[in-house]
Image (cartoon, coloured by chain):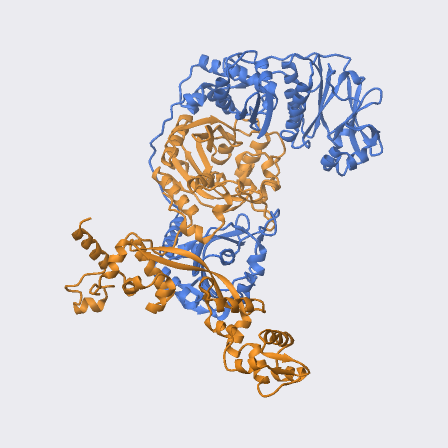
Chain colours: A orange, B blue
Amino acid sequence: MKDTAKETELSKIVETLHPLERKVLPFLSQASSLNELMKKTSLKDVEVMRALQWLENKKVLVISTLLDEVIVLDKNGIKYKKNGLPERRFLKVLKEKSKTIEQLKNETKLNQEEFSISIGVLKKKGLIKLGKEVELTDLGKKAFNELTLEEKFIHQLPLNIKELKPEQKYALEELKKRKEIVNIELVKEKKFELTELGKRLAKIKVHNTTLEQLTPTILNSGAWKGKTFRRYDVSINVPTIFGGRKHFVNQAVESMKKVWLNLGFKEMSGDFVQTSFWNLDALFVPQDHPARTMQDTFFVKNPKLGKLPDKKIVEAVKRVHENGGDTGSKGWNYKWDENIAKLNVLRTHTTTLSVKTIANLDKNKLPLKFFSIGRVFRNEALDWKHLFEFVQVEGIVVDRNANFRNLLGYLKEYYYKIGFDKIRFRPSYFPYTKFSLEVEVFDEKRKEWVELGGAGIFRPEVIKPLLGEDIPVLAWGQGMERSILRYYNLDDLRELYKNDLALTKKAKEWM
Amino acid sequence: MALIVFSKKDLLKLLGKNISDEILIDRIPMLGVSLENFGEQIEIDVTPNRPDMLCVEGFARSLSTFLGIKKGLKEYCTKKSAKYKVKIDSKVKNVRPCVACAVALNVKLDSYTIQSIMQVQEKLHSTLGRNRKKVSIGVYDLNKIKFPLTYTTKPKEFCFTPLEHHMPMSLLQILQKHAKGIEYRHLLENYNEYPIWIDANKQVLSMPPIINSQETKVTETTKNLFIDITGLEQNAVEQCLKIIITALADRGAIIYDILNLNLKSDKIRIDFKYVNKLLGIELKSNEIGKLLAKMGYSLNGNIVEVPCYRTDILHQMDIAEDIAIAYGYENFVPEIERLPSEAEESKIEILKRKISEIMASLGFVETNNFNISSKEIMQNKTLSNLECIELENALNQDYNVLRSWIIPCLMQVLKDNKHNDYPQKIFEIGRVFKKGESETGVLETERMGVAICSQTANFTEIRQILDALLSSLGLDYAVEETEHASFIAGRVGRVLVNGKKIAYIGETRPEVLENFNLTMPVAAFELNVSELLKILKE
């Protein structure tokens, strides 16, 4: 690089310097660690650290972390720093004259442990003599006016173990033998080294002429005129913030709803608690069907029974179950019991809404199209692939002229709109529809067809009792949770309703 | 749904033709059978309407016509013989009245076919038989029994040696000690005598619907079979016998009808116009005839002959469906009708969406809880006395009632999120349930719960949120003092719009916070969204 280019580079860096960086800059060549800089700049450690990190980003210096063993005061050490080591108190009491052990014990007020240590230490140093009484030696008398190595050491802490002088090493060894006076801690020390660029930068005398934050005062006074603003490093990360969020399952529901509305469907909504009549009987599901058992469906304890609708509908449904009534069907050939139909349940599918809608529609307004997206309930223990409550999506088309090809046509369009363009229709079975089918998509990863949802045309045994005539009703539906799992790359259904606020906040928007 | 396993070799033998794997993998699903596994062993999932496919023989029969190897109705004939006589004692009427039985001669059994028979027996028991309640099946070595047989009942002390045992046990002992007895004894509860099949030598065949006897057990040397079906519904009983007998006949057995075995086809009239209109295509009668032949039917004029084992055919629409399957769902050209469009979102859903948008814009995170909750959090932990709707068959204590208000669910969420950053501001819109005048006796209302949990959460802060929400909906409101067990006295208000109570708002009592292990204050409100909709409509 040519000198002029280097100059431009330097001055550009100078323009970006944050006030903290400016503060540490003059000391960079005189220091090599965070601690030293703290002492020299009187800044807090976080401030120095931030300045160093920013300077490192600017390639002014390189930070390295060293693990150091540092000697610090322990519990007793802190006490002794304030009150003096026990042996010092011992010496003080002996200053005037020799004393018996008993006297010493009383006057020094040391505990047994401190007392014996003091004797040990002082004897070892040759400062006291033990006889009938304890007395100071000459050395002891001399020592009276100077601090011991240990005492000096306590006042010098904290110290880096690598930087100890011989007498400090001695003091450390001695104190380590005693209880909770010193402790050796592992400390991370931040060191830094200036780069070539940094060395040149450190030589420059930086005048602070740039503006930091633009404020109303500066604006009003016009003080900004003729000045430049400190340049920011626009590439660095900022602290994360989150706004309010809609729950991601509800976002998915809303976007699904838009698809239906765009297809011209009208929304159905209704109660979660329904009589078995609407949940199953009206759908031609026989009363001994496994779906009616406690293992499959939630029943309400109180109020246990609901009311049946209009007698005409009830009679027609009863006949259709027993012998097919006037539908041309053979029926299920058993005795239909209205008490079973009265049992209140948590709806097991939104098809309940569809039959209620069909029962109440105005035939003069046909053709009509309806959809619903709502919670349904199944008596399943909660695990990674089962929920006892989940969201079902469902649509119906009531049209005298509707046929099977129309059903396939709607399915093709609907699934195209929700993102599946390669689908197939496979014959299947549902108790209340004919031409029942599963819509499947080819999973390229697993190399197999995967079910998306079910469809069919309602049986005459369902429609005729409700409408008085057999009008084709196309119907299709699916659960929502699996596609939501796929979108969020999750594999546990429980994650959807776990309500971990951190995850809900972070979840990407449904698109 | 029922899973059936069989060997590919056996399937191909029954089909009578070598079919490539590619064709099988492609065609089986299009017959309406879900292919779960394909290899030397094939696993299929049979839908409840087709119990005739619960055995490999029945499945192969349908597949063979579907693939065009065979065509049309398969006729079965049965013989009668004076040798095979059974007596039905009137005593069975009170316990297990319905019965049908037959004999199959020249059955070639090996360990695979015995397993196969056991599989169909087990699958029929669990599906059509409603776990042996409606129907149960017994299969015996014909050469080990002596006609005439009697279907009767015997008292509890009566003894015989049940299957897999070597010593006689009394009927009562069987119910108390035998694994099958324990599993199915609820089916014979409250009876003094139990059903028994017994032969001319007083040799017991079985104790329906519990267990067969050891002496009449089928082995690999068995050549001839006696089959009985008993149950509570005659139709289902006869249907089961048809499925098993046609399967054995397909393997070359000679069939003797003893009681209630009818293998004659049924006849259903179809209306070609009806079929074509439903399918949206124009099929001529001969084309319909060909398609029906692919599904194992025969067509004479407009009368369809339905094979005896297809008891799922209730209506000509069922036949129309089979015509569509034969035509191939993949061959229909999808066509959408352009109907006049009346798209409409429900009013309550629009309001809920608007409110949740406003709440999100105020910095609140939406939660999503189940409607099924626990009495513990609805009442005990919140100190509330709101009545809950209880479930008859609750999963467990954590999920035993329908929620009566939303705030307890929010408190639970806050409890589960103590590891996350504060402040926590959350809301949820959902159903609450109480008793009331309605079709079911349950009244359902849409409500929103809102909670702030932070160092400084207080009445003013939560009231500001309510204020922002209601003013953005263009509503004036008033707050009057009230009492609520979950909130601090003197810091809880009732919110009124046009004089109607639509919300309560306050600071949560420390006792409640403690019950949810919360160490931060919570201020909350709960708003009746359904009521709000009524007010907005006015």
Q: Is residue B418 visible?
A: yes
Q: Position of residue B189 (x, y in %)?
A: 75, 38
> Which residue corresponds to the image point at 42% horizontal and 17% vertical from the top-left?
B283
Q: Position of residue B408 (x, y in %)?
A: 52, 58
* Residue at the extreme bottom: A96
Q: Does B523 appear above or below A375?
A: below
| Quarter holding residue A110 | bottom right
| Number of on-image labels | 0
Quarter of the image with the C terminus of chain B in it: bottom left
Q: Decide which of B70, A452 is in the foreground and name it.
A: A452
Q: Is residue B474 visible?
A: no
Q: Does A340 appear above or below B239?
A: below
Q: Position of residue B281 (x, y in %)?
A: 40, 20
| Quarter holding residue A370 | top left
Q: Position of residue B101 (x, y in %)?
A: 71, 20
Quarter of the image with the N terminus of chain B in it: top right
* Residue at the extreme left: A226
> Which residue corresponds to the image point at 54% horizontal and 31% vertical from the top-left?
A431
